[in-house]
Amino acid sequence: MTETQAPAFDRRMLESLVCPLTQTVLEYDAQAQELVSRAANLAFPIRNGIPVMLVDEARELD
């Protein structure tokens, strides 16, 4: 792994994660490195392979 390459997100983690706002299933967006909650219209960032599941850190979807 190079210094510019982020650690990989473990997709098995998706089975236990839900949106903190709506408690619904999340979708993994590998290109954007985000977990997407369609129900809440939010995307939660994945930083250094770790999902940041804070509503304050999420971005609103277009």
Image (spheres, helix red, strand yellow):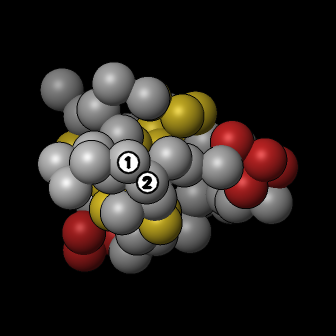
Dot 1 surroundings within 10 Å: few (below 14), some, or many (20 or more)? Answer: few
Residue 30, x across and y down, in percent: 44, 29
Q: Residue at image x 33%, y 24%?
A: 31
Q: Which residue is mark 1?
A: 1
Name which residue type carries label 1.
Answer: Met
CB under 8 Å between callouts 1 and 2? yes
Above or below: residue 34 compared with residue 46: above
Q: Residue at image x 38%, y 48%?
A: 1
Would residue 12 appear left or right of 4 to someone viewing this image?
right
Q: Residue at image x 20%, y 55%?
A: 3
Nearest to the observer: residue 36 or residue 32: 32
The answer to whether any part of residue 60 appears in the image is yes
Q: Secondary structure at mark 2?
A: loop
Would residue 8 appear left or right of 32 to someone viewing this image?
right
Q: Quadrant of residue 54?
A: bottom left
Residue 58, x across and y down, in percent: 28, 59
Q: Which comes sooner in the sequence, label 1 or label 2?
A: 1
The answer to whether any part of residue 14 appears in the image is no
Q: Which residue is mark 2?
A: 7
